[in-house]
């Protein structure tokens, strides 16, 4: 598991906590709040071990501190409920990711004694690399507790929206053979491209626009509110970087529940000096 994904792995768990609506658990099982507190405590225990190992200390990991119900209940009270617990999960996941990065390639493979119990039964008692412990905690261990949360949330079915806002999604696609321009000319063209986007917003045709990062094909996305696909296409094709042959456009129809984005643009009147 790539370290960059350790923090992101917790996003569905956090979303479930923020959504709430949990039912009481089966007898003998933890409620959602204790499940979340356990995840927080376990993240902190493992991060603490990793931080000490990064500094050269010899440590051991025992999950007993993450299953103490009195301690978990206190954590729930301090967090103040679901929203506070969600933020604690995010904080502890960030700490776990930082501690993983701090280990570096050399120390991530260092072994430590690991003791893990489940409902009082020891299921792991032996050496394990700190990297495997962190990655396992942020994968199958997290997945197991996420499924616990999901089991406590009754299925919810939403009715389809009755009204929609209609947009045109314009994808600015990088051409495979764009013209090569001197640096000063290219910079001027980029300025003209940005001025075009500003003009579209001022005219009330565009709700939002911005560049796409880390993609070999897409340069940017523009969200038009022009009234039709053809009108949005004509406006997008008037972009200087499209006319110059640097970008091509793909235009898609996109609808959202009415008012969901609150992005309907307003025409900005021009200011004319007397």
Image: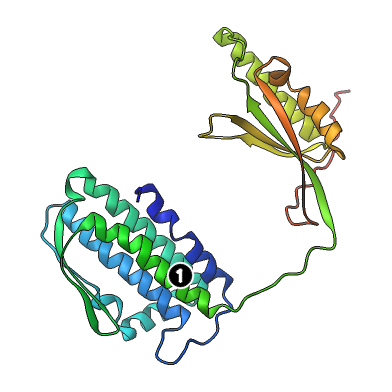
Query: On the picture, is 112 further left or further right than 101?
Result: left
Vertical comparison of 200 with 1: above or below: above
Query: On the picture, is 186 further left or further right than 140?
Result: right
> Which quadrant holds residue 183?
top right
Q: Nearer the viewer, residue 51 or 2?
A: 2
Q: Nearer the viewer, residue 19 or 128?
A: 128
Q: Most extreme residue toward the bottom, as rendered? A: 27
Vertical comparison of 176 with 159: above or below: above
Residue under the point 32% across and 65% down:
43
Q: Nearer the viewer, residue 60 or 216?
A: 216
Check disc 1: other Cα within 10 Å, few if <14, some if 14-19, many if 20+.
many
> Which quadrant holds residue 232?
top right
Residue under the point 34% across and 49% down:
3
Residue under the point 48% across and 66% down:
13
Which residue bears the numbered disc 1? 146
The quarter of the rendered structure image containing the C terminus is top right
Relative image position of residue 259 (x, y in whole percent):
78, 56
Q: How is the image coloured?
A: rainbow
Residue under the point 16% across and 56% down:
53
Vertical comparison of 227 with 11: above or below: above
Can residue 203 be spotted in the picture? no
């Amino acid at each position: 598991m790539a370290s960059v994904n350790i923090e992101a792995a917790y996003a569905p768990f956090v979303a479930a906590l923020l959504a709430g609506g949990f039912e009481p658990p089966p007898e003998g099982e933890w409620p959602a709040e204790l499940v979340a507190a356990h995840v927080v405590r376990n993240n902190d225990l493992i991060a603490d071990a990793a931080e000490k190992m990064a500094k050269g200390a010899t440590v051991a990991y025992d999950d007993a501190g993450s299953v103490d119900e009195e301690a978990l209940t206190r954590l729930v009270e301090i967090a103040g409920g679901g929203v506070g617990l969600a933020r604690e999960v995010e904080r502890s996941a960030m700490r776990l990711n930082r501690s993983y990065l701090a280990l570096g390639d050399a120390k991530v493979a260092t072994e430590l004694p690991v003791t893990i119990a489940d409902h009082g039964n020891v299921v792991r008692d032996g050496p394990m690399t700190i990297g495997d412990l962190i990655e396992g905690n942020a994968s199958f261990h997290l997945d197991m507790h996420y499924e616990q949360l999901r089991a406590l949330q009754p299925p919810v079915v939403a009715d389809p929206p009755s009204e929609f806002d209609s947009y045109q999604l314009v994808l600015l696609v990088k051409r495979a053979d764009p013209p090569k321009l001197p640096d000063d000319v290219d910079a001027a063209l980029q300025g003209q491209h940005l001025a075009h986007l500003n003009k579209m917003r001022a005219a009330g045709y565009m709700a939002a626009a911005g560049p796409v990062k880390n993609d070999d094909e897409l340069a940017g996305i523009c969200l038009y509110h022009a009234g039709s696909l053809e009108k949005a296409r004509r406006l997008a094709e008037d972009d200087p970087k499209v006319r110059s042959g640097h970008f091509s456009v793909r235009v898609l129809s996109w609808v959202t529940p009415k008012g969901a984005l609150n992005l309907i643009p307003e025409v900005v009147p021009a200011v004319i000096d007397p």
